[in-house]
Amino acid sequence: MPHPSRYFFTALCLFVLVFHGCNQASPETQKTKHLERAAGYMEKGQLQEALIEYMNVTKADPANAEAYYQMAVIHLKLGGRTNLQKAFVELTQTLELNKNNRDAQVKIGELYLLGNEPAKAREQADLILASAPQDKDALVIRGRSLLNEQRFQDGIVELKNALALDPKNVGVYLELSRAYFFAKDRAAAENMLHQGLTANPGSTDLMLALGDFQLSIDKPDLAEASYKKVVDIAPENEVGRLRLAGLYQRINKLAEAEGVFQKWAAAYPQNEQPQIYLGDFYSWIGNPGKALASYRRAEELNPKSAIARDKLIATYLDAGNLADAEPKVKAILGHNPDDISGRFFKTRILLGRGNLDDAISGFQTLITANPDFAPAYYFQGIAYVKKRQLPQARAAFTETVRRNPSLPEARTALAELLLAEGAVDLALEHAQAAVQLNPRNVQAAVIAGDAYLRKGDLAKSKQVYEAIAKALPKEALGPYRLGLVARAEKNDTKALAYFEDALTLKPSAIEPIAQIAVMKIAQGKSTEARERVTQQAATTPTSALHQNLLGELCLAVKDMDRAETAFKKALELDPALLGSYLNLGQVYYQTGKTDHAASEYETVLTKAPQTLQAHMMLGIIHEQKKEYDKAKARYEKILALNPKFAPAANNLAWLLVDQGGNLDVALNHAQTAREQQPTDPSIADTMGWLYYKKNAYVLALGLLKEAVEKLPTNPLVQFHMGMAQYKNGDKEGAKRSLQTALKLNPRFPGSDEARTTLEGLK
């Protein structure tokens, strides 16, 4: 009789085997369960969960081509660059395991088209067509690949073959219309869209394409009707509403555009998206108050909307409202310290508080981690501008445009810097691009008009300025610049009228009154010029520039007492005004009071050794006394105290130019001055003259034009301008500038050369 323990052992083994068998399914069983779960998740739209299940399938069965294919389908549905790259890998694996998977071949062909590899896309299409010559999807891929290679007629043949197999295929009608359009057969392109709508009367895609086509051939009324039809038959169609509103914005029907967004918001009162678009519209037309209200409403409707939140924070920051922005930024970073939006806005807050070095560093950290994040480059450029580091700012704005060519603010900022540097054509290119992106961008329009004016294209500059004057009838901007065009046209009566109109609109503007003064001087009416400036200065008692202009006019006619009073008043109002230091020094020089002036400034330095203005005036006086080494030492002392003090850097640069020093060292000093005070005309004059000395006459001319515009009564600036015009072959311009210089002061430094040059021009 067997021992009972043997029965127990046998039973135990059987139990273990049965239990283990119930809990350790075969790989095939596991695969089946994962496939079933994946299918269930796909049906519910839970793509990430389905993706995990298919990955489990490939672990259980690495040769399962269908699982790889389904993973690719999921990645395509998720979208985005990373998912498209993953989809390509999965499709490639699918075809390695099953080269006859027709759907995988179609999808990988489409990805090749998306990646601008038409020849590879066509290879996939040809593989399908080899066994299925009537495969319409393969014919479409083949046709599109030929279009991408600009083989339009061949592509049209393939697409027509596909259409014959599927006469209702909306995508083929769209591709054929595109093909005819690029083949410059506009009639056929439009006809194809109408044929498509006949076959598919309710296709919003075809209606939108028809509206786009009608707009491209300058038929906005027809385009409006097409877009309206889309909105009527498919109110939920976001693209249709955006197209209609965009059309109204393009043709300047702003009330109608606003109505589209408002009706959209009213039709979907619980949806935050229309409110976001409404806020974007208000921001585009320059109404930040209404934009803010719309973004707030969007966030109320959906507190989880990151887009609404970020739009709201950006609007706060654009308005300088750091107090309301900061709590929202802290909330973002509290939830996720690495959130890119939160870090970006935190750095913008540093910029708003004037912590420029920290802001620049913060933006650089963002850029290093996210090289394609264009806004970080743009605001880093803004920080550099505030620090007067203009070459770095230009580089940042250039990189912004490279990363995001559709950002009008970056285009505008870059155009402004380029124009200031004298790169007129490049500035015009970016200004025009900015206006195209936003036709209401007044700053970009002004830059474009200024560029045309500098190029001598008076008709185009006038056209731009007239548009500005019409759009902004209460601003001095339009009349002032139209006055510049009239001056260039030598129509003094019209120019004076424009400048007076500008002063009526903005009495504190310095440019129009300066132009009036220089015109009257050129007409031999110096007394009238001084009286007019005196009258205007009385209306703006806190304007240092008006006092400086008055002083220059008095200096020009040797009224030294009034000139000295005016320059001193200017410096009281603005101690950093470089031109007034130079002009006051000239008064002292011409009146022989240099020693007395030096004594007074030395007294100031005994009380406040780091008073830069006192050092500055002593340097000027040394220059007047031709004590150039002492002047250089004084300016070097200033730069030791403050390496970015523009007046000293400019004067040191000027001494090196004037006294035959190292021009490259001089240019470095001048660039330092320019970075700190980019709008100072005296610095523009120094840099322009430096470029003249280095035989870079085109660069010189751009800077000297800027200087003359702001210092029209300075004889030395007019002289420099005349010599640059002479070297650039503009003999008539040179005559005018040199004659103006001699009228302003017959004995200014350089007057002999001016006369000699004029004699040569005769």
Image (tube, rainbow, N blue to C red):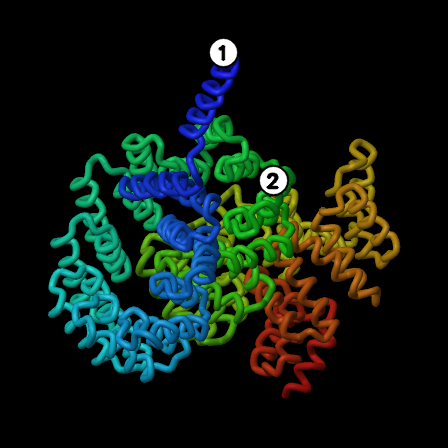
Q: Nearer the viewer, residue 719 or 9?
A: 9
State the residue lying farthest toward the front.
1
User: Which callout, 1 or 2, points at the residue further toward the start of the chain?
Assistant: 1
Point out the image quarter for the C terminus: bottom right
Compared to 247, does 638 lie above or below? above
Res 4 label: 1
Residue lying at 26% horizontally and 71% vertically, measured from the top left: 136
Residue lying at 37% horizontally and 82% vertically, measured from the top left: 151
Compared to 735, does 112 lie above or below? above
Compared to 4, does 267 lie above or below? below
Q: Quadrant of residue 480?
A: bottom left
Q: Is residue 565 left or right of residue 471?
A: right
Q: Is residue 307 visible?
A: no
Q: CA distance from mark 1 to mark 2?
A: 80 Å
Q: Dot 2 surroundings within 10 Å: few (below 14), some, or many (20 or more)?
A: many
Res 641 label: none
Indicate the position of residue 194 as horizontal and vertical percent values. Answer: 15, 72
Indicate the position of residue 651 as horizontal and vertical percent values. Answer: 75, 56
Disc 2 target residue: 362
Q: Nearer the viewer, residue 420 or 190?
A: 190
Residue lying at 25% horizontally and 70% vertically, measured from the top left: 172
Indicate the position of residue 305 as horizontal and vertical percent values. Answer: 35, 36
Between circles 1 and 2, the one closer to the viewer is: 1
Residue lying at 85% horizontally and 57% vertically, measured from the top left: 628
Q: Is residue 414 left or right of residue 208?
A: right
Mark 2 belongs to which amino acid? Gly
> Regarding mark 2 in the picture, which secondary structure is present there?
helix
Q: Dot 1 surroundings within 10 Å: few (below 14), some, or many (20 or more)?
A: few
